[in-house]
Image (cartoon, rainbow, N blue to C red):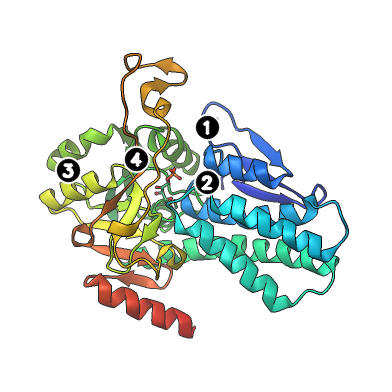
Amino acid sequence: MPAYKSIEWLEDQKALRLLDQTKIPAELKYVTLSRVEDIAAAITDMVVRGAPAIGVTAAYGLAVAAWQEESDLLSATMTRVADADAILRASRPTAVNLCWALDQMHNRVARQQPTSLVAYRAALVDAAHALAREDVEINKAIGHAALDIVPQEATFIHHCNTGGIATVDYGTALGIIRIAHEAGRKVHVYVDETRPRLQGGRLTSWELQQLGISHQIIVDGASGFVMKNKSVDMCVVGCDRVAMNGDVANKIGTYNLALVAKAHGVPFFVAAPISTIDPEMPSGDQIEIEERPASEITEIDGVKVAPEGAEVFNPAFDVTPAHLISGIITEKGIIYPPFDETLKTLFLSNEQD
Ligand code: MRU
């Protein structure tokens, strides 16, 4: 079992402790945050990252805000939490989990109808704990659902980082690989290093090492060579937002990987908790794609690797069109094309549960 926790509520300090993902693998360092502004900055600066992890972090951010308020008035605290909500919502744009988790917090707390400050604060902490617990259960369910399609000896290509640190534990796409390994499947993973921030080379490889899972890091551009010359059973990736036509936003480079997979007849699967499916998003064309600082591309660990003044375009995500996706693996099972129909059915059955 990995000896780290991505996200932890410190009840005695009314603060949130995050594993600092910008420091991995060089050091295992935690930051303790007791101001919502610092929590939002940790999301923007990718101290915490990965769609489910930023959702749960934002959820705890509301609890932190409720304790940050110095007055002992319920109304003032509720205003503080509303302000915190706006700050957190703006911290990163692409992953729907962030806004989904904040909406869940408000709905769940409203159901408790807290009438005192004590009850309100407790309801926020309890709701965030529930989202954190559910995230782990959902990831395990995704992993178990995928066992049906993972062969006894399975070779994967994985993009970005979707593991225990991108979630509360287990992970989505990486959770599939972990659960297959735990179920005794013989697993090997080609790990896309995932330029520019190297979530694969730095984080996924580190997580796979802790889990004792066989893997090799490859540069992103090697996926074509690997699919042509090695026997790859499937690509498996996570996602930040699934549109209702089955288009999927995920880490930049996912689209290229899906095209290469199509060219080589390699199945391309997306792991998605239902919270990552956005019922308001008709197609991937409308998904807001975050652009990040030029320095992520022009510098590596503070060392310039591009000429001074070089211009940069740095979209952090891309959209893989539905027709390149073989299936979407959710906690309620695997859905297949036509996604515009199967996503609707999934949503309806999920609402009935
Ligand atoms: O920019 P990042 O590192 O937050 O991007 C993360 C991804 O694209 C992941 O694939 C996605 O959030 C799913 S994490 C379970």
SS for callout 1: loop
**Cα distance in 3D space between marks 4 and 3:** 25 Å
SS for callout 3: helix
Q: Earlier in the sequence, mark 4 or mark 2?
A: 2
**In front here: 65 or 135?**
65
**In front here: 266 or 30?**
30
Q: Earlier in the sequence, mark 4 or mark 1?
A: 1
Q: Earlier in the sequence, mark 2 or mark 3?
A: 2
* Amino acid identity at mark 1: Ile
Residue hosting label 2: 165
Question: Dividing the picture into quarters, in which one does residue 276 lie?
Answer: bottom left
Q: Are marks 2 and 3 in contact (CB under 8 Å)?
A: no
Can residue 147 be seen by looking at this rendering? no
Q: Earlier in the sequence, mark 3 or mark 1?
A: 1
Which residue, as the protein is rendered here, is positioned at the far right?
A: 72
Mark 2: C-beta under 8 Å from nearest atom of ligand 1 = no
Q: Residues within 10 Å of mark 1 (few under 14, many from 20)?
A: some
**Cα distance in 3D space between marks 3 and 1:** 29 Å
Q: Earlier in the sequence, mark 1 or mark 2?
A: 1
Residue hosting label 3: 227
Residue hosting label 4: 315
* Amino acid identity at mark 2: Ile
Nearer to us: label 4 or label 2: 4
Please give the name of the residue rendered at 46% of the width and 21% of the height, measured from the top-left corner: 301
Residue 87 appears left or right of 273: right
**Cα distance in 3D space between marks 1 and 2:** 11 Å
SS for callout 2: loop
Q: Are marks 4 and 1 in contact (CB under 8 Å)?
A: no
Residue hosting label 1: 24
Nearer to us: label 4 or label 1: 4
